[in-house]
Amino acid sequence: QQIPGIPPPSKPLPQRQTRVALVAAQSVPKFHSAAERDSYEELRATRAALEAGLAQIRSSLRRLRTEQGSVPALLGEVVAAVGRLPAVAVAATAPDHAGGRKKGGGEGGEGEGDGFGAQYGAEEDGA
């Protein structure tokens, strides 16, 4: 059957299908186990979700720059997009806040100047 407007295939159809199958098989990664394959597929799905989430964040930030009047709504969109990122990726990229106090010889005692500690100490002293 010839479809109008489409030229006939240059090779017979079965040979083309065989070639396409061979090329496709060569581009598929080889895995040593089902667990390795599953891990690879999970990684690809996570990456796709991250890329989609980051694209949404970039879009919202672009709009934020151009539409200064609706900052709260757009900021909410950015926060929501970040919240949709996979938890594993967020945990992997979260900064390490271990030992969050100032390093070096800061003025005052422990807990002063960080808001909560200063208020807590004032309540004890003033009460």
Image: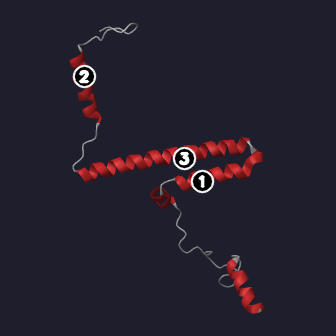
- Mark 3 and mark 2 residues within 8 Å of each other at the beta carbon: no
Q: Which mark identifies residue 80?
A: 1
Residue 10 placement, left or right of 79: left
Residue 1 % position (x, y):
29, 9
The image shows residue 17, relative to residue 97, as above or below, that is: above
Disc 3: which residue? 54
Label 3's element? helix
Q: Which mark identifies residue 17?
A: 2
Q: Amino acid at mark 3?
A: Leu
User: Which residue does the image show at 66% across and 82% down from the upper left?
Assistant: 111
Q: Amino acid at mark 2?
A: Gln
Q: Which comes before the other along the chain, label 3 or label 2?
A: 2
User: Which residue does the image show at 28% across and 41% down from the upper left?
Assistant: 29
Label 2's element? helix
Q: Amino acid at mark 1?
A: Ala
Q: Which comes before the other along the chain, label 1 or label 3?
A: 3
Residue 112 % position (x, y):
70, 81
Label 1's element? helix
User: Which residue does the image show at 47% across and 56% down from the upper left?
Assistant: 89
- Mark 1 and mark 2 residues within 8 Å of each other at the beta carbon: no
Instruction: Tell me the CA gap for discs 1 and 2.
Output: 45 Å
Q: Which comes before the other along the chain, label 1 or label 2?
A: 2
Residue 62 placement, left or right of 84: right
